[in-house]
Amino acid sequence: MTHRTPLGRALLALIGIACSAPCAVSAQSLYFTETNVSANAFGFAPPVQPPAAGATVNSPMPLLPSFITQQADIAGPLVPGNVQGRAVAYAWAQTGGLHVSTQAQASVNAFEFSNPNPNGSGTSSVASLFRDVVVFNVPGAAPGTLFNVSATIDLAVLYAAQGLLLNAAPPSFVTANASWQAGLRLFSGAGTHIQYARQGACSWSMATSQSNCVGDPTGAAQLSFTIPSGTNLVFEMTANAASFAGAFVQGLGAATSDSVVDMGHTLAWGGMQQVWDAGGTPVANFSMIGLGSGFDFRNAYVSPVPEPTTAMLLLGGLTGLAWRRLASLKRPASSAG
């Protein structure tokens, strides 16, 4: 989903302009976050109809975090058993820092009925963006003079997918996957000065009963780049996360699945550590001011609030309880004679 304000359109026009000299365009800053969350549970035969829950939050100026929880539950009115889908998403874009988290859960308890093959799922996704126009400046340097810069970026991500299937015959199944992407760019129409991109994903395998996770390195990374003085540049940070969980039981049995991406300090600008001129001489007096935000990107981003990790861990604890509850269930014995 795309949401553009007049500020956004002005900035997109600015990006296409070659800025080898200071641009004759007023500086714009666009703060943007988009959160899409849906949760559903279904699978019972008529006349019981599956409820569905969903929510979307879109804000071009995310002054406060977007935190959405959706849950859909079905309990059979005449027979025991239940199906649940749940989804949670969190997003907050700030100057120099992005925060996103997603979680999805699905569970089916069908130990006491064999029809109509209940299934549940949860889906959550989030996209967050920060963009500003910045100007790097060294007092006394002519516009366009190139300098070498050393800076850092920090990325923290926890992601996982898991599943559990109890006493259920094929084609019953559980499925779960989680994925994330994070990136940073500093660019103008004249070229790109920083191109930083990281991604990762987890998926639960029924064949091996384990999760397969792959991803780029996280943590602090050193950025080395060349930047012109006195030139308008676009500073852009992006973060995306998605979680899905599904469970299906044919006949008797139980199933649960869970996936999570907790990026907490998803992506945080670590500041500029050192600047050198073309001859290799260190420069002590410099700045890189956001013309829209007013932030000096010479400094590191510092989060003013606790991260969503606590909430996500709490949710994970609830999932663990659900798993233990399912693990303790046993298929009822047949009645004698």
Image (cartoon, rainbow, N blue to C red):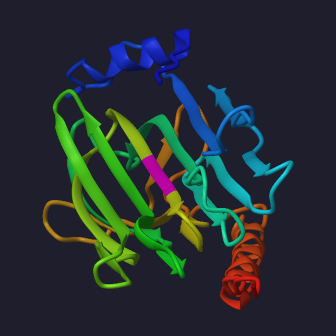
Res 11 seen here? yes
Q: Where 69 sits versus 54, above or below?
A: below
User: Which residue is more in the foreground, 36 or 130?
Assistant: 36
For this orientation, the residue located farthest to the right is: 77
Q: Where 154 sits versus 30, above or below?
A: below
Res 23 seen here? no
The residue positioned 66% from the left and 53% from the top of the image is 85
Is 243 inside the magenta-drawn segment?
yes
Instruction: Tally the numbered discs.
Output: 0
Q: Main secondary structure of the magenta part?
A: strand
Residue 8 placement (x, y as % from top left)? 49, 18
Residue 49 placement (x, y as % from top left)? 71, 33
Horizontal relation, residue 69 to residue 137: left or right: right
User: Which residue is more in the foreground, 112 or 146?
Assistant: 112
Horizontal relation, residue 312 to residue 224: left or right: right
Residue 80 placement (x, y as % from top left)? 81, 62
Residue 218 placement (x, y as % from top left)? 38, 76
For this orientation, the residue located farthest to the front is: 337
Is 300 inside the magenta-drawn segment?
no
The residue positioned 30% from the left and 84% from the top of the image is 208
Horizontal relation, residue 211 to residue 80: left or right: left
Which corner quadrant of the image does residue 325 belong to?
bottom right
Write down the region rendered in magenta: 238-244
User: Which residue is more in the foreground, 202 or 190?
Assistant: 202
Q: Where 317 sits versus 128, above or below?
A: below
Q: Where 119 sits versus 192, above or below?
A: below
User: Which residue is more in the foreground, 19 or 253?
Assistant: 253
The residue positioned 75% from the left and 85% from the top of the image is 337
